[in-house]
Amino acid sequence: MKIIIASWMFDGETIQRDRAVAFDEKIVAVDTKEALKARYPDAEVITLDSNAIVMPGLINPHVHLEFGANTTHLHYGDFMRWLQSVISHREELIEACKVGCYKRQIDTMLTSGTTTFGAISSYGKEMRACKSAPQRVIFFNEAIGSQPAAVDALYADFTARFEESRAMASDRFIPAIAIHSPYSVHPILIKKILKEFQDVPLSAHFMESPAEKAWLEKGEGDFKEFFENFLKQSTPLCFPEEFLQLFEGRKVLLTHAIHADESQLQAIADAGHTITHCPRSNRLLGCGRLPIEKLEELQIPWLLGTDGLSSNNSLNLWDEMRTALMMHSHLPLESLALQLLQAVTSKAGDALQLPIGHIQEGYWADLIVTSLPDTPDSTEQLPLQLILHTNRVKQIYIQGQHHA
């Protein structure tokens, strides 16, 4: 049993003063330091300085590790140009990213305070590295493939990868499913997968770029030439609304959704889906800005993810939050900062339906301690100051276990 005593605590929802948290593998109690010391006299007591803040570990629900060897190979500024560069360098980059490459990315996320991440995996090559990670990992086995004749083979490959991950399942390694996108996965394949594998987390890319929107809604635009040349496909597999209907009765983490229109956003709200916002990736690929104010209006929960190093320069969620602060410049600064902290803690834990992201009795003791350069004097400004000044964290606990 340990007790952390802090002048400042962010519990996943609000900033609190002069609180203490008692924990072993799970959080046992949150109270005053006097009450917890009296209740657990044999506990190890950790007293933080006045500049320090204890908070839930960060949760990154959407990261691709497979292209982690990329630095300057891929072209940014336009989605289609980027996609063509991915196709040109795909084999080279995948071959270059092996065990050491995966470990570097995992370790970098850990030092910045990410205690849970969702790994989107197209090939399964990083599965064992993720299983060995100190963090809690939601391992999203990704389905991709649009050719009708290949559905059975694609399903067999997906099933083999999913079953391999399911054999490793634990509290810290959670098998899950990712459907790549409405333009790249045949509806028959999606239906087969969703029918067979239930009660697992689901993720999908949705309406990321202008090219995707033009293709899915009208069968036009830059994707038309791409699909005709590469796949001999002249019409989209399904409309956006049809794609969303495939998930009826299931809740999905939809990544990006920048170009979802009013009716599509309403369908997302009605279904109880969540949107994962990746602002740096969106900017680098020329995709635009997610209207998070519209999501708030429709009461659509939104999270924050880094995407992968194929469309980002770091996997640090503090970097992502700083970018979001600047990207959404028309929104009030203090309230946006608090929303961003909630997006990488409590809202992410709730969306994943896991007992993480809150400092609350019964939740896993996934905790981080960070420190500001000076003692803060404003509760309202604290979320903003945390985001502006944090890159690495001072202490990390995952399921109560300390990580240096």
Image (cartoon, helix red, strand yellow):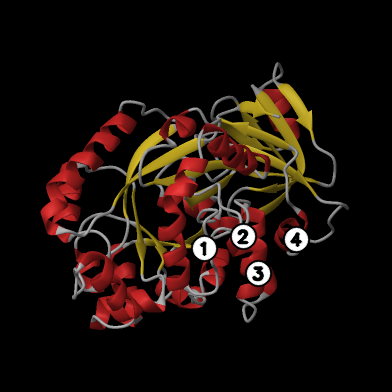
Give 6 or 273, whichever is nearer the viewer. Answer: 273
Where residue 392 appears, as percent x and y from the top left, is 73, 45
Q: Which secondary structure lies at badge 1?
A: loop
Query: Which residue is under mark 4?
Result: 388
Spatial separation of the CA atoms under disc 4 and disc 2 = 11 Å
Res 367 → quadrant: top right
Query: Which residue is under mark 3?
Result: 325
| Mark closer to the chain start, 3 or 1 | 1
Res 235 → quadrant: bottom left
- Amino acid at dot 1: Cys
Q: Nearer the viewer, mark 1 or mark 4?
A: 1
Q: Is the C-beta separation of discs 4 and 2 under 8 Å?
A: no
Spatial separation of the CA atoms under disc 2 and disc 3 = 9 Å
Judge the density around disc 3: few (<14), some (14-19), many (≥20) Cα neighbours within 10 Å. many
| Mark closer to the chain start, 2 or 3 | 2
Query: Which residue is under mark 2?
Result: 320
Q: Which secondary structure lies at badge 3?
A: helix
Spatial separation of the CA atoms under disc 3 and disc 4 = 9 Å
Q: Is the C-beta separation of discs 1 and 2 under 8 Å?
A: yes
| Mark closer to the chain start, 4 or 2 | 2
Q: Is the C-beta separation of discs 2 and 3 under 8 Å?
A: no
Could you tell me which residue is drawn at 24 percent across and 83 percent down? 218
- Amino acid at dot 3: Leu
Please give left or right for residue 52 compared with residue 250 in the image: right
Query: Which residue is under mark 1?
Result: 278
Where residue 99 appears, as percent x and y from the top left, is 52, 32
